[in-house]
Amino acid sequence: MEYVTAVPHPRSEAPGSARAGRMSLALALLCGALGAAVALLATRQRWSEGTVTVAGGPFPLTANGSDVTGVPAALAIVGLAALVAVFAVRRAGRLMVAGLLALSGAGTVAAALLGASDSTALDEKAAKASGDTAATVDALTHTAWPYVAAVGGVLILLAGLLALRYGRLWPGMSGRYERGGAPRPRRRAQPTDPDRPEELWKALDRGEDPTGA
């Protein structure tokens, strides 16, 4: 009794790989761009607030994300640049840029979470407002914006992980602009009717010799 072993057709994997490449590319672009925008927006919002005691009583203080730390905004910009650069390089270069993209997202998350409980920016403002270098902020509270910035970092990190996993399936930015090494065939001159002057002028415009054979 003979047994026939089914061998998968090699062509069956190509459509699946192409589909995975397209889906991962679209998802990475969405996550990277959205994550950078969210992180940049969150750093411009109020992260913490409190008061300091001055001669006239409690004085309110607020600190934006950019006052607390500039790391999330800087890494979001780096991540956005890396997302674009992924398409300009190939092979090992693409892996390196994808790794930079993932690290930018991870760094954004870490910096945002550390800034969520940081009071240094408000302490500095309290010292300036009171004229006492030892003064610190009172009634310190934090908003949810640092965690929003962290979510933006997670999206950038996801884009980097997708680039590391599926980047080899993505097209290159310079692929469509590369010219082949083989010379293009020259168009064969069309026969010209000497009895029609307009045909002579057209031949001259094409760079052809209307009197040639």
Image: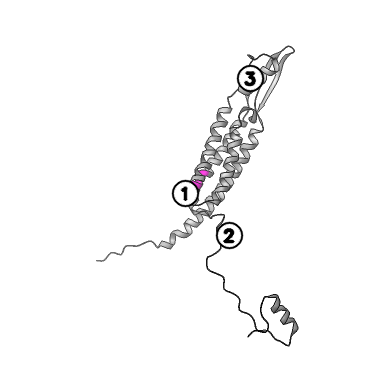
The label number, if any, that marks residue 123 in the structure image: 3
Q: Distance of mark 2 from mark 3, alpha carbons?
A: 55 Å
**What's under tag 1, amino acid-wise?**
Ala
Residue sitting farthest toward the bottom: 195
130 or 61, nearer to the observer: 130
Q: Is residue 41 above or below residue 6?
A: above
Disc 1 crowd, CA 10 A, few/some/many (<14, 14-19, 20+): few
Q: Secondary structure at mark 2?
A: helix
**What's under tag 3, amino acid-wise?**
Asp
The main secondary structure of the magenta stretch is helix
Q: Distance of mark 1 from mark 3, alpha carbons?
A: 46 Å
Q: Is residue 152 above or below residue 67?
A: below
- The residue range painted magenta reads 160-166
The residue singled out by tag 1 in the image is 92
The label number, if any, that marks residue 177 in the structure image: 2
- From the top left corner, tell me how far across and down residue 59 is, in percent: 71, 17
Q: Is residue 165 magenta?
A: yes
Q: Is residue 157 above or below residue 70?
A: below
Residue sitting farthest toward the left: 1
Q: Is residue 35 magenta?
A: no
Quadrant occupied by the N terminus: bottom left
Horizontal side, residue 100 vs residue 39: left or right: left
Q: Earlier in the sequence, mark 1 or mark 3?
A: 1
- The residue depicted at 58 percent of the width and 28 percent of the height is 115
- From the top left corner, tell me how far across and down residue 4 is, in percent: 30, 64
- The residue depicted at 72 percent of the width and 81 percent of the height is 200
Q: Distance of mark 1 from mark 2, alpha carbons?
A: 21 Å
Do callouts 1 and 2 mark residues in contact (Cβ within 8 Å)? no
**What's under tag 2, amino acid-wise?**
Tyr
Quadrant occupied by the C terminus: bottom right
- From the top left corner, tell me how far across and down residue 81 is, in percent: 59, 44
